[in-house]
Amino acid sequence: MLPFLTPGQWALAVLGAFCVGFAKSGFTGVGLVTVVVMAQLFDPKQSTGVLLPLLICGDVFSVVTYHRHARWSHIVRMLPPTLVGVVVGYLLMGVIEGGRFRAVIGVVVLLMVVLQLVRQRLQLDGLPHARGFAWAMGGFSGFATMLANAAGPVMSLYFLAIGVPKFELVGTSAWFFLIVNVLKVPFSSSLGLISPGSLFFNLLLVPVVGLGIFAGRRLIGHVPQRLFERLLLVFATLAAVRLLWGA
């Protein structure tokens, strides 16, 4: 059954779907708008399952658009720790309250922003390329994406830290999150977070996700690399603050 929403709530749902597409075009921090919107429209835990198919649609659109720019070496490196984080997040979904975990994500994302700023100032180029750093970021990314669909800013900050150029960042993220989000489906289904009603709700919003991808694609080509990096830091900071505020 399709969830009952007022016209105002449908407007918020449309905004959230648009932000999914816009985020998948490269402005990843914007995706946290959708996390917040869905958590307002549905039960916070249930909202993760409602949002997951929309994210997969956005990933498919993004892969079609940016697949030529993917760096598979980064994807292969980050997938194992991310999948470990997904499993840990799945096991803890019934234990950690959503508000508390949102606060944890917010704090870590803010720490990643600070790390990026310090790296730029002090030229700490060795740390982001260390295996331990990659595993820590991948593990937390999987943990965050399973519990709150909130890994976008974390992975963007990691890719920025290792110096991935703008379009390669978008293409690599597209394939990376498509794989991870598809692998999350059985976990969310087993928790009862995906239903026929939620899938029909997703289906109605798919065209809006495509519109968001189109708008982001048109904009990203006109945004210089340095400005792009600064925007990602700003979006990540705003997303982290909003997660802390809503915790």
Image: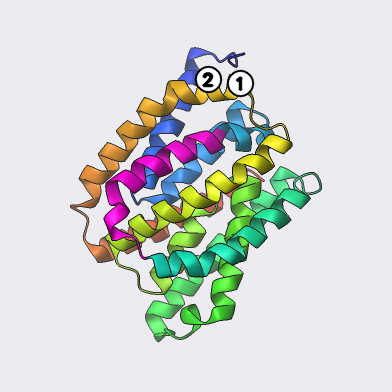
Q: Residue at x 35, y 73 (%)?
A: 163
Local crowd size for mark 2, using a 10 Å CA cut-off: few (<14), some (14–19), many (≥20): few
- Percent from the top left, x then y, of residue 111? 56, 67
Residue 50 or 188: which is nearer the viewer? 188
Q: Residue at x 61, y 66 (%)?
A: 81
Q: Residue at x 36, y 26 (%)?
A: 207
- Percent from the top left, x then y, of residue 14? 43, 26
Q: Residue at x 42, y 45 (%)?
A: 30
Q: Is residue 209 left or right of residue 243?
A: left
Pointer 2: what residue?
Answer: 200
Residue 244 at least partly seen: no
- Percent from the top left, x then y, of residue 79? 54, 62
71 up-or-down from 179: above or below: below
83 up-or-down from 205: above or below: below
Q: Secondary structure at mark 2?
A: helix
Residue 47 at least partly seen: yes
Residue 68 or 119: which is nearer the viewer? 68
- Percent from the top left, x then y, of residue 87? 70, 55
User: By what rule are the colours in the image chosen?
Assistant: rainbow
Pointer 1: what residue?
Answer: 196
Q: Is residue 70 magenta-colored?
A: yes
The magenta segment is 51-71
The quarter of the image holding the N terminus is top right
Instruction: Give residue 240's mark.
Output: none
Q: What secondary structure prevails in the magenta region?
A: helix
Type of the residue with mark 2? Phe
66 up-or-down from 192: above or below: below
